[in-house]
Image (cartoon, rainbow, N blue to C red):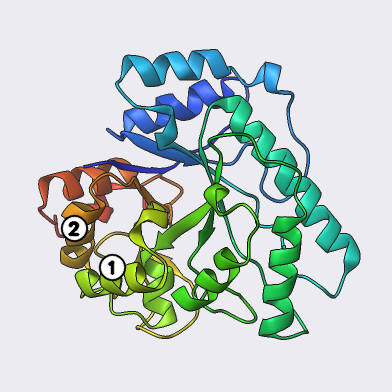
Amino acid sequence: MIIGCHVKMTAPEFLAGSVKEALSYDANALMLYTGAPQNTKRRPLEEMRIAEAKELMEKNGIPMQLMIIHAPYLINPANAVKPEVFELAGEFLYSEVIRTHAIGASYIVLHPGSYTTTDTKTGMDTVVRCLNGLPELPEGIVICLETMAGKGSELGRTFEELAEILERLDHPEHYGVCLDTCHINDAGYDVNDFDGVLDEFDRVLSLERLHVIHLNDSKNLRGARKDRHANIGLGTIGFETLHRIAMAPRTAHIPKILETPYIGGEPPYAREIAMLRKGVYEEGWQEHLTVSE
């Protein structure tokens, strides 16, 4: 099972610390931001201990393509209302792509964005314009558009929306998809029938374009369009379904990344990964973590 989680990337160890954190959870994949997700401040690459991180990955038999980068949420390539937001989206996304390549990673996950006060068509046109306006991308880099819950004016709620964006891009070899189980549940897909979801994905998008899976439970009923992640087995999707997804043969080669909430300020990933690896759910597992009042 290729299973990991979202980890921190902080001073003084930076990337090396991120890999160490993932290894402490018995993960063999990881996802991180290259800097604070709420702003554009970034440390110089020379300070990020890239060589040490690569050495740790190699020592533990983890290929660098299993280090996933997540683009910051402030990048909104669908915003046609504010030119400065649109310009920032393209410029900052490209700088994050360059950092991803310098780190040695292959995949960077990107939310397609929100059209704010315009409409779906305008938003889609704007995303395509933004991505086609990027300078030439480095070889081997794939920007993975994430499936979204459809909250507010979010794009990417349906496979068809993502397919339309991808089909209009000038360099499709640099683009793929990240499937989030919480998001597609909240968007209305029946994740209990994951084979059916994969069939639909393959028909609309092609499974060859699926490179990352975010494995999250949901606090919401199917179709709620709210996007609220729950811990594994503590949401409406449930442990059995998420374990089946983690074990699905058709996506065995794809990294599954947990983005579940901390419990009482503590990361839950070691216990969640252990349960998924064993295929056995432990009732009350969360009580072993520090639970806040």
The percent position of residue 220, horizontal first and vertical second, equals 39, 79
Whole-number angstrom distance, CA of label 1 to CA of label 2: 15 Å
Three-letter code for the amino acid on which mark 1 is drawn: Leu
- Please name whichever residue, 21 or 81, is drawn nearer the observer in this view of the structure: 81
Q: Which mark is residue 115?
A: none
Report the front residue among 163 and 282: 163
Vertical arrangement, residue 114 with respect to residue 249, above or below = below
Q: Does residue 219 appear anywhere in the picture?
A: no
Regarding residue 95, the answer to whether it shows in the image is yes
The residue to which callout 1 is attached is 198
x and y percent of residue 136 in the render? 71, 41
- The numbered mark, 1 or 2, whose residue comes first in the sequence reads 1
Q: Observer-nearest residue: 209 or 116?
A: 209
Q: Secondary structure at mark 2?
A: helix
Instruction: Specify whether 143 is left or right of 277.
Output: right
Q: Describe residue 95's horizontal placement relative to residue 22 as left or right.
A: right
Residue 76 sits in quarter: bottom right
Give x and y (percent) for residue 224: 44, 85
